[in-house]
Amino acid sequence: MATELLTDPATASRTKRTAAPSRWQRMRRDGSAIALVFVLPYVLLFLVFRIGPAIAGMLLSLVKYRITGTIQWRGLENFQRLFADSLFWNALQVTIVYTLIAVPLTVVVSLAMAQLCARSIRGIKVYRALYFLPVITSLITSGVIWQWIYSGDGPLNWFFSAIGVGPLPWLSSGAMVLPSLSLMSVWTRFGYDMLILLAGLLAIPREYSEAAMVDGASAWDRFWRVTLPQLKPALFFVVILELIQSFQVFDIVYVMTGGGPVRSSYSLVFFLYDQGFHYFDFGYASAAGVVLFAITLVVSLWQRRLFREDS
């Protein structure tokens, strides 16, 4: 009887299925179950505080909602009102101009500093730590420092007065306020980007550069033809990061200028903040947030495609 059970095909198949380890058992065996336990809290927080508010913002953009009133369905009316609002177009223009100044400037400075910090010189770890200090400095402290730097008797105006050019209206002139804010943004951001690019530089095998040197390539040729192509993944990440940060610029505008003078530094996020927390028109503010998300997504995907084609 026992021999018949063992040789029965159906029984053997059931025995085989029972013996096969489950997915959870395989995860426990290869250690991914432990990793999942550690990752799960972050995933939950991400869903609750990132994805949840994003979905809520998209839904709010389709209604009229004020704190003191009831929710009324408006469909695409908020977007129609937004595209007819000259203040929105002014804020979008300010944001684009700021992005065009701040992103290239920050990436170039970060790359130059990463090249300097990649060298093996005495005390290089101290220099790297010093360059990173502005990143961990609080925004209020940075704002106080840069307001003094840009002030009438600050070091910048002292220098330009000494060479007969100044003093210059750094924050009180509509033409100069965005370059001035971009300069401050570079100071607060380049340390973080420098670390990413430095990691990319240190990962490039020295053999490539040494072979180019043997072939007689100059320092510029080695950087342009050897280092830069190898650095593209890190460079792409830094550009995307800076692009998103620049489109979302709010904090330095709020601290340094409050959107002035005459709304010449009135960014898109400042517009969103004004509509939401000054006029309490949350539906309209959410519509501006959805447009900002769409612009950032399209530009990021376009840049990703460009980098892929170039690679």
Image (cartoon, rainbow, N blue to C red):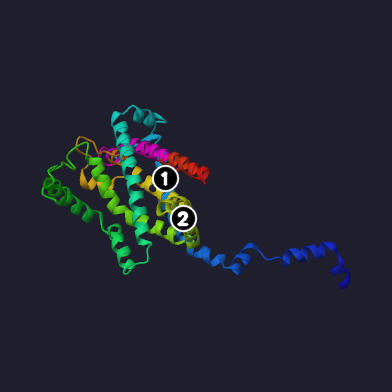
Label 1 sits on a secondary structure element that is helix
**Residue type at numbered disc 2:** Gly
Nearest the viewer among 143 and 152 is: 152
Would you identify the image quadrant in which residue 193 lies? bottom left
Q: Label 1 crowding class (10 Å Cα cut-off): few <14, some 14-19, many 20+?
A: some
Q: Which mark is residue 216?
A: 2
Residue 63 vs residue 178: left or right? right
Q: Which residues are magenta?
A: 274-295
Q: Is residue 73 above or below residue 156?
A: above
Residue visible at 37% across and 36% down in the picture: 287
State the image coordinates of residue 60 (x, y, percent, origin top left).
Answer: 39, 39
* Most distant residue in the front direction: 216
Residue 289 lies in the magenta-colored region = yes
What distance separates the C-alpha of mark 1 from that of mark 2?
54 Å
Label 2 sits on a secondary structure element that is loop
Q: Which mark is residue 36?
A: none
Would you identify the image quadrant in which residue 263 lies? top left
Residue visible at 42% across and 47% down in the picture: 240
| Residue designated by label 1 | 54
**Residue type at numbered disc 1:** Ala
Residue 201 vs residue 166: left or right? right
